[in-house]
Image (cartoon, grey):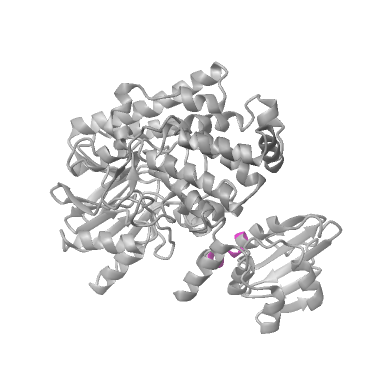
Amino acid sequence: MGAKSTPLFEIHNGAKVAKPTLDYWSLPEDSPARTSYDDDFVDEVADGVWTFGSHSLVNSHAVLGPEGLIIYDTGDNLADGEKFYSLLRSVSDAPIRAIIYSHEHYVADAKVFVDYEAERGNTDIQIIAHSNLNDSFARTGGVAAAHPEVSSVLYARSAQQFNLYLPDEGPDSRYKNTIIPAVGGFIPANTTVVHGQTLTVAGLDLVFYTDGIGTDTTNQVLVWIPSKKLVMNNVLWGWFPNIYSARGGRYRDPNGWMYALDFIRDLKPEILLSTHSNSLNGAEQIETRLQNYRDGLAYVLDQTLKGILMGQSPDELRYSVELPARLKNAPILVQNYGEVANMPPRIYTAIFGQFDRNRTETLNKLHPAEEAGRMIEAMGGEAAAQQKAEQAYEDGDYLWSAQIAGYLVVHNNSAENRQIKANALRQMAYRTTSTNSRSWYLSEALELEGKTAVITATPADAASVQTNLGDYVNYYRVRINPERSAETNQLLALDFGQDQRFGLRIRESLVDFIGDLSGTNTTPDLAISLSAEDWTAIYNNLTTIDDLIDQGTVKVTKGSRADIVGWFAMFDPVYDWENDPALRALQAQMTAQ
């Protein structure tokens, strides 16, 4: 709002940004005001201690012990792994003895490290993680949802949040905090740890802490190396943390985050290695950074709770809670990742849900299409609304322009209306300091212009399905069409062999999952035998049950072919490979590989 006179600048790859972003991006690599690594970088933090940074979101760390190297995090995809391993080998030739996963988000490229070490004759590497990491990653690919049935949507939203759809060069380009999601490089942990456990690794005693380290996942591993007074963690980030991540996920309680910061402070580290911020050597500067970070979280939480007590709604809190100058100017609380304005509404909804006592807007509300139509009519019709949106754009009131254009697109999804909204979103993107928000704005703008296709839900990873067959049979139940199945009561048994036999019972518009078909009330009406690969194809809507029966890979063992085809016809497809442009693009990419 009021951004008409806000100047824009270009950084190294042509990305258009506002001056706060330009100033931060122009800081020297060793500036105390820069709190994250933003390019490929080797930081020798102490003797035998290195951090490897990149333009991605995650760092990798290496600690040299008497018997070899300990690695903390390896990146988010195979390309990260290649880069980090190359940087590691530029400073040390010692063998890797252990890889530690800080949490489930950055585990998808350990394979690169393991494979290169195998070529060197080193095949004995401990992969250390929280006790629930293997299971969580196998189920969700590292983006756990409150309801795992929709983890594929969180995965798709992650792609939109982390610059996947933005170009490498030009005004709309990505320039920081880019993650290209992938799961193919994950190596399951072979050593799991519990809170307070000590292991001798590479000749060093490591103490692992897992309880109460409450940040962005439930499987954090914080490591303390007493002999070096060194902490490795995913608690202190290089920017204001995402109490709310726009991609979704569980509530991130600021109290849990503050507890974890206090836990680190009580250890009194002299070296601090963090997954998301630059590394520190020196107790005093570590204490200052931890205190500022804790104060930022505490301030936003307390002021949000005060606002709630005073009757403020989520949207009012968005504007009333602002960091004071002392914290706003603390480098560690720079808002180039998360934005403080997005945090208070999430705290509110964690407590109360979406209802803010506004009965006409959050308890009972018009359908979006109905609301858009009426709003356009209230503005004097489509042409008048377009004029208002364009005038707001000319005035630099981009948020209002985008909001009006949002009504226009819902009311009439024309190229003209889409372009009005895209224009406003693009200007908002150029002016935000948050790379998350920039990616959301620009990816939608590019999609509105037909320049990219944003995927809604990613197909299930074949390895995840095969590892967790029962879960993925269970997840299928939510696709039932209630109208077509309203009068059906049928139990289908799915036999995958090797004692993996599950049931799905259609029961008048609902589906029950049965994990054990040995009970007296679980005699199936219909039955098929199939492979995990068959189920993956069915789950991802890549084929039909009819085609698989034709091919002979699915066999009907009870009932008729027509019965089986009719049973599956009661479920709606989630992935429309023929008509969804994002899925068509993904299919072309898969075919090319």
Depth order, front residue of 479/14: 14
Task: Locate residue 281, reporting x and y percent.
Answer: 18, 39
* Image quadrant in which the N terminus is located: top left
Q: Name the residue: 35% across, 59% down.
A: 127
Q: Which residues are magenta?
A: 465-471
Task: Locate residue 61, reporting x and y percent.
Answer: 25, 51
Depth order, front residue of 224/79: 79
Q: Name the residue: 67% across, 38% down.
A: 381
Residue 470 within the magenta-colored segment of the rendering:
yes
Q: Is residue 522 above or below residue 252?
A: below
Do we see residue 51 in this rendering? Answer: yes
Residue 565 within the magenta-colored segment of the rendering:
no
Q: Is residue 343 left or right of residue 42?
A: right
* Image quadrant in which the C terminus is located: bottom left
Do we see residue 460 in this rendering? Answer: no
Q: Is residue 34 left or right of residue 106?
A: left
Q: Residue extending furthest right?
A: 487
Task: Locate residue 59, reporting x and y percent.
Answer: 29, 50
Q: Is residue 176 left or right of residue 553?
A: left
